[in-house]
Amino acid sequence: MSYLDHNAAAPLRPEAEAALRAVLEVA
């Protein structure tokens, strides 16, 4: 997943990670 790989370079905050997981669940 290029999207996750791109964000892997920057530290993800708990809020961002939770929001990202929610989007993946809907997708």
Image (tube, rainbow, N blue to C red):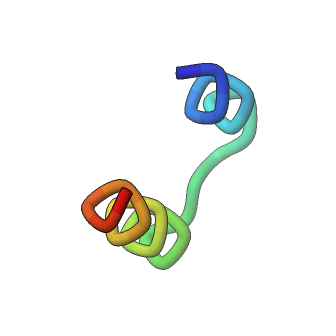
Q: Please tell me which residue lies in front, 5 or 13.
A: 5
Q: In this view, does 5 lie to the left or right of 9?
A: left
Marks counted in the figure total: 0
Q: Please tell me which residue lies in front, 5 or 12.
A: 5
Residue at image position (43%, 66%) is 23
Residue at image position (64%, 46%) is 11
* In the image, farthest residue toward the left: 25
1 w.r.t. 19: above or below: above
**Quadrant where the C terminus lies?**
bottom left
Q: Where is residue 1 in the image (x, y as percent from the top left)?
A: 52, 21
Q: Where is residue 17 in the image (x, y as percent from the top left)?
A: 44, 61
Q: In which quadrant of the rendered view does residue 2 lie?
A: top right
Q: Where is residue 26 in the image (x, y as percent from the top left)?
A: 31, 67
Residue at image position (73%, 40%) is 10
Q: In this view, does 26 lie to the left or right of 1?
A: left
5 w.r.t. 3: above or below: above
Q: Please tell me which residue lies in front, 8 or 22.
A: 22
Q: Is residue 10 left or right of residue 11?
A: right
Q: In this view, does 2 lie to the left or right of 6?
A: left
* In the image, farthest residue toward the front: 27
Q: Where is residue 3 in the image (x, y as percent from the top left)?
A: 65, 33
